Amino acid sequence: MIKQKEFAKRRLQLMDMVGEGAVTIIRAASEKIRNNDAHYPYRQDSDFLYLSGFQEPEAMMVLLSGENEGQSILFCRERDRYYELWNGPMAGTRGALEDYGFDQAWPVSEMKRRLPKLLHDRDRIYYDLGKDSEFDQLLIGWMNEFRSKTRKKFHTPDEITALDNNLHELRLFKSRTEITAMKKAARVAASAHRRAMRICKPGLTEADIHAELLHTFTSNQCESAYVPIVGGGANACILHYIRNRDPLNDGDLLLIDAGAEYDGYASDITRTFPVNGKYTGAQKELYEVVLAAQLAAIEAVRPGTPWEHVHEVAVRVATEGMIELGILKSSLDEALEDEHFKEFYVHNTGHWLGLDVHDVGEYEIDGHSRVLEAGMVLTVEPGIYIPPSATSVAEDWRGVGIRIEDDVAVTRDGPDVLTSDVCKTINEVEALMAE
Ligand code: GLY
Ligand code: MN
Ligand code: MN
């Protein structure tokens, strides 16, 4: 578990980063209705979680950067015995001070009265517009009011800056405790994938495998970081396939993209393996191409490498492989230059990973791909998808989709594959499935 001290340190870092005179406002996620009066499981906003560990809705954090330490303030719900009877314990303003280390805490019902006063004498507001239109309007309304009424008397903020260049930069670089949480999320997800490989056989359905994944996550104190993709046969070619209900057929491949979330941190793993435990000759040929692309791309995950280069390495190896197999018919130069590979290699090779599965952080700086640095964590996930309609490709490969995805931390000693507990070579996968 991440400790109060680390959250307080993150708040101080952020206040320091945005500088004296700034006020940063971050709102808790709201509860989402699934249907009628049933809710989706609550998931806190990742920025809010990063800065507090606070898990309740109807809360707002205000960080006042100061000359020295600054002040962190939480608006939250007051404890309510009736509410607690139905929904369990609440922190309340006292808990916000004692258990979460805020300097001040106020009932959220007082927010509209207190917040405008906190904005007086501040130069700049840091806040992500667009997540909550009602609050956006309130904030903009206050700023307009300040401008008309208090122009002469107070210095008041007249700009709102997004959190990308400050908070999201902090989140991009993982601390040791964050890496520990991510390793646990990775271990649990790896164990779920191994279990899926062990039990998979023709006659089961995608739903049976989906259920097994959730079993492993839940019994290891994890959530699903996103809805798992369990795609048998041609369903693997549908990138966001989540229906997960079809029968698993002898001779088909099964693509599983499933990640666990532990203590808010995501893992993100994809494996593609034969339903019956043995890859066919054609499946092996294409699988080896994707695996070679992935291994080469992982090797490139080192401090100093431009992020884009990881993708370029994977694309080059995958394209060479597709040409060798006759799936692409042009020369390598042509296939790369004219992007013929995009017919079957349709997505990027990875993304940042952290509290969000597609985590925050810029990929480009001043129009150039940013360079990898120690502490970043990214996925490496090349994929080749030959849709059933691809009549230009030999029949054996039509309806075959293969992706291999691992989570990799950038370290000074090279790539650290957090998800290495689940095998991916053909021999290892077949051996595990034969157990
Ligand atoms: N599971 C989402 C992704 O691989 O990006
Ligand atoms: Mn991914
Ligand atoms: Mn994935």
Image (spheres, helix red, strand yellow):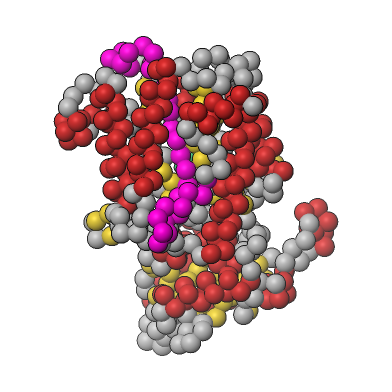
Q: Is 285 above or below relative to 184?
A: above
Q: Which residues are magenta?
A: 390-419
User: Which image quadrant is residue 213 in?
Assistant: top right
Residue 206 lies, in percent from the top left, at 59, 24
Please tell me which residue is depicted at 29% across the width and 26% down the height of the picture: 322
> In the image, is 75 to the left or to the right of 338?
right
Please tell me which residue is depicted at 59% across the width and 30% down the height of the picture: 432
* Tally of marks: 0
Residue 71 lies, in percent from the top left, at 55, 80
Name the one closer to the observer, 88 or 189: 189
Split into 4 quadrants, where in the image is the C terminus? Answer: top right
* Whether residue 48 is visible: no
Residue 85 lies, in percent from the top left, at 83, 56
Please tell me which residue is depicted at 26% across the width and 30% down the height of the picture: 320
* Whether residue 288 is visible: yes
Name the one closer to the observer, 355 or 203: 203
Name the one closer to the observer, 429 or 8: 429
Residue 279 lies, in percent from the top left, at 48, 20
Q: Is 6 above or below relative to 21?
A: above
Q: Is 26 above or below relative to 184?
A: below
Queried whether the magenta region covers residue 120, the answer comes back as no
Split into 4 quadrants, where in the image is the N terminus? Answer: bottom right
> In the image, is 4 to the left or to the right of 182?
right
Queried whether the magenta region covers residue 403, the answer comes back as yes
Please tell me which residue is depicted at 59% across the width and 56% down the height of the picture: 181
User: Which image quadrant is residue 348 in?
Assistant: top left
